[in-house]
Image (spheres, grey):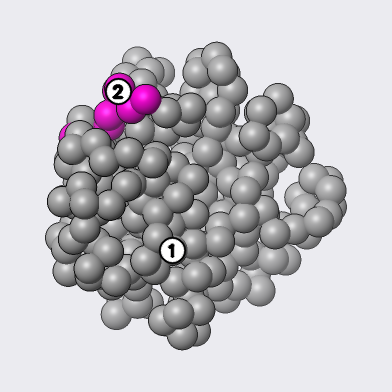
Amino acid sequence: MRVFFSPKQSVAQNDSFSPSAGKPALLVAQWKQKWPDRLEFVEPEPVTVEQFSLAHGRDFVEDILACRKPNGFGNRSPEIAASLPWTTGSLVSAVDHVLENGGAACSPTSGFHHSGYKYARAFCTFNGLMVAAVSAHSRVERVGILDCDFHYGDGTDDIIRLQDIDYVSHLTTGSLSCKSEEFLESLPEALARMKADLLIYQAGADAHVDDPLGGWMTTEQMRRRDRLVFEYCHSAGIPVVWNLAGGYQSEIQLVLDLHHATMDECLKLFS
């Protein structure tokens, strides 16, 4: 299975509570050791200002990239700005791949769903989910975004609303009031209601009960969540791209282990 990663999308030093900017490189290094024969690591294509502007106001895009406005981490780091085309590029490249070849692909990325049409906040600068969804629309009728980050994907809904987008089905667990077992029982039906021709799945690690900013699922429940998503896509023949989203436990290896579990469940069904 292909993983779309470039070192250019990872920033090790970010002066932030969130580890998201540096997490991809840590994760990829471990994946190369764990699954040397199962994963193919591919350099993504960076997105352009024009591609960012599919989901964002162009002035906002240009100001962020030029460090004239704070990014989602609340700073104006040139290193963060330089990484942004590669981060969204990873997700867009993964979507392009599965639309051409079917199956599944991984984009080891985070920091998308709180970014709205003209704002960045809460560790999210550009909304790669919506950039990828809008760019895919010329090739598929409907795009599903299953956002299992613990927090509400307000930026995604902001873009959908302001651009009057009717071809994206967006399910964000951060807006639900049900309990974890109820959610897991209803998940296959919820996926079917999306009627998606492509699924973008945010497999957030901050859903774990031990996460300081999240917490509603055990380790086993998160595995079941991932398994249900991949089983549905596999049986329905729906191409799926998954990414990392949040995860804030102070011991980073605990977060990485949750992402390892998602990859493990994916590889049980997709090569």
The residue range painted magenta reads 8-15
Q: Is residue 84 magenta?
A: no
Q: In which quarter of the image is the N terminus?
A: top left
Q: Nearer the viewer, residue 66 or 139?
A: 66
Q: Which residue is at a point 45% across and 50% down the rendered structure image? A: 121
The answer to whether residue 250 is visible is yes
Left/right placement of residue 45 relative to residue 254 reads left
Is residue 188 positioned above or below 107 on the image?
below
Q: Nearer the viewer, residue 119 or 260?
A: 119
Left/right placement of residue 269 relative to residue 271 reads right
Q: Which residue is at a point 81% across and 56% down the rendered structure image? A: 177
Q: Nearer the viewer, residue 223 or 183?
A: 183
Q: Nearer the viewer, residue 198 or 246?
A: 246
Is residue 82 positioned above or below 152 on the image?
above
* Spot occupied by residue 39 in the image (x, y as percentages of width and height): 32, 32
Q: Which residue lies furthest to the front in this view?
A: 68
The answer to whether residue 135 is visible is no
Dot 1: element: loop
Q: Mark 1 points at which residue?
A: 116
Is residue 54 positioned above or below 19 on the image?
below
Number of residues whose C-alpha sits closer than 10 Å to that of mark 1, classed few (under 14), some (14–19) or many (20 or more): many
Dot 2: element: loop
Question: What amino acid is at disc 1?
Answer: Gly
Left/right placement of residue 103 relative to residue 58 reads right
Q: Distance between the residues labelled 2 and 1?
A: 25 Å
Q: In which quarter of the image is the C terminus?
A: top left
